[in-house]
Amino acid sequence: MQIVLVFLAAALGLAYGQNSDGFQFTSDICIFAGITMIMPTLFNFRFKDIKLIVVHKKTLFKSMVINFIALPILAIAIGLTTKDFGIAAGIFTLAVLSGGGMVMHWVKKTDSDASLGFILLFINIIFISLSLLMLHTFGLYTEKYFGVIYSDALNLTSFARAVIEYLIVIPFILSRFVIMAKPVVSFINKYRPIISNISIFIIISYLFALQNSQLLFEVYDFQPELITVSFVAVAAFYIGNFFIAKFSFDNSDPQQRSAYWFTTTRYITLALIIASFSITSFGVTMMIPIMMAYLIQIPFAIFYSKYVK
């Protein structure tokens, strides 16, 4: 069902954008994503849960090393072979953004440790600012290799403040008020899968209908080979990601299984938002690998969750 929703949302978004002027990007979509997808995952978070950082420090440390060192190195190696600045930047963006709105769904579906999952989710959201700084650094140090001029018109370091506000501060503060109303929490938890699917459908449709997304049709018309290059590169990244996670975590252990999901699942929705903002800095081809990630990550997660069960 989720695969169908993703494909349908993407198709409707592209069709609408192609037959109209498309949407102008607004930060309201970030607030919407934070409230509908991040906030519900914070209901079970309590400040006392911070002690889990000490209890599971080895697993958390391993997860951080993989997400902020191993996967970025893998992404750089794959990205450099594509010979395209935008595609390489898109893959690198996937590498430095862990988790996302759907990761807790897979954690719970496979009977993994949800408490540790909430800690990992919270930590990775806080580290989004680091992820954006790493992306900015990637642009600075690879522009000569690709023979382009990296223009930081977006100013990713400033954008990090907005991301923290919309995806951390607002959802967290709102969650503290909402948990006081137990009937509201019960209602949201009961219908969370439906709320999540509707949110994903709206967000994907909107992002694919942006004016910037329509530039992809020009890429297809003049450089169709880049579509194939992107798909192969993204597939290689996820295959490498899978083996790194498989040999790093013991999936028979609920805690390590949670960390596994936070390694193989990337924050593709936020990545697409960042790519939409970053076209002037990295080029429109940055969006292609992230769109391809939807076609690979979600089917893989559905298949692997059944395999684990």
Image (cartoon, rainbow, N blue to C red):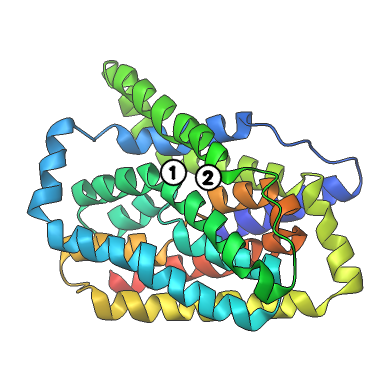
Q: Residues within 10 Å of mark 1 (few under 14, many from 20)?
A: few
Q: Is residue 118 above or below residue 181?
A: below
With 15 as the anchor, is 254 left or right in this view?
left
Residue at 69% across, 59% down: 287
Report if the CB atoms under discs 1 and 2 are less than 8 Å apart: yes
Residue at 45% across, 35% down: 164
Amino acid marked by disc 2: Asn
Q: Quadrant of the N terminus?
A: bottom right
Q: Secondary structure at mark 2?
A: helix
| Frontmost residue, 208 versus 287 | 287
Q: Which residue is mark 2?
A: 197
Q: Is residue 293 visible?
A: no
Question: In x, y percent, where is residue 196?
Answer: 48, 42
Q: CA distance from mark 1 to mark 2?
A: 6 Å
Q: Quadrant of the C terminus?
A: bottom left
Q: Which residue is mark 1?
A: 193
Q: Secondary structure at mark 1?
A: helix
Residue at 25% across, 76% down: 248
Tell me the number on the disc at residue 32: none
With 112 as the anchor, is 78 left or right in this view?
right
| Frontmost residue, 214 versus 297 | 214
Q: Is residue 121 above or below residue 44?
A: below
| Frontmost residue, 74 versus 266 | 74
Question: In x, y percent, where is residue 201?
Answer: 61, 45
Q: Is residue 87 above or below residue 255?
A: below
With 66 as the anchor, is 145 left or right in this view?
right
Residue at 46% across, 56% down: 97
